[in-house]
Amino acid sequence: MENAFIKKEKVRFQHVDYAGIVFYPRFLEMLNNIVEDFYEEALDMPFKKIHKTGGIPTVDLKIQFKKAARLGDELTKYFWIKKLGTSSMQCGFKFEHEDGSTCLEGEVSLVRVEFTEGRDEIKAGPFPDEMRAKLERYVIADMRF
């Protein structure tokens, strides 16, 4: 998957339920982890920095679970941008097992927001030019699972 941001994650005891498979909310945490890593590693904008003046909240999420992940599995997580707007982006993601089979896949929409002084209000704000240039490197508009 050219242009995708890629990270590996091992399924740990903290991720699984009594049956030994990943409890679905843990997958959402794993997704948030790759978004956070993407911002820090690909954009050089760690959450610690961007949360001083704004954020990048999730406004829409679609996910399809295809195959269970078990304790000890190593998943390869892919994250890319399908559509880049003025202040929002629609992103694709896919988690694969070591054998290449799909664990889960989906789409997440993220919006860049800015806080007003005092953090009383939050409003959408455009991606700065430097950030947009970095984001454009990860656009894969026609990605098919």
Image (cartoon, rainbow, N blue to C red):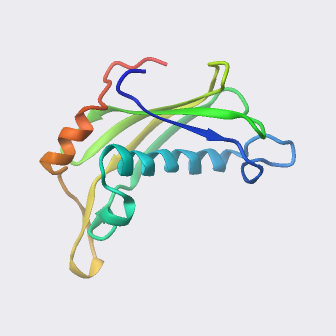
Q: Give percent across and percent down for residue 128.
A: 15, 51
- Vertically, is 119 above or below 12? below
Query: At 34% across and 37% down in the image, what residue appears?
Result: 90
Residue farthest along the bottom direction in this orientation: 118
- Vertically, is 28 above or below 120? above
Q: Quadrant of residue 141?
A: top left
Q: Give percent across and percent down for residue 55.
A: 33, 61
Q: Quadrant of residue 103?
A: top right
Q: Give percent across and percent down for residue 45.
A: 31, 55
Q: Give percent across and percent down for residue 39.
A: 36, 49
Describe residue 30's horizontal placement relative to residue 36 as left or right. right
Q: Quadrant of residue 4?
A: top left
Describe residue 95's horizontal placement relative to residue 109 as left or right. right
* Count of numbered circles in the view: 0
- Vertically, is 95 above or below 57? above
Describe residue 122's horizontal placement relative to residue 21 as left or right. left
Describe residue 129's horizontal placement relative to residue 108 as left or right. left
Residue farthest along the left direction in this orientation: 129
The quarter of the image holding the N terminus is top left
Work out whether residue 113 or residue 95 is closer to the camera in this orientation and state it: 95
Query: At 29% across and 78% down in the image, what residue appears?
Result: 120
Query: At 62% across and 44% down in the image, what residue appears?
Result: 27
- Vertically, is 22 above or below 45? above
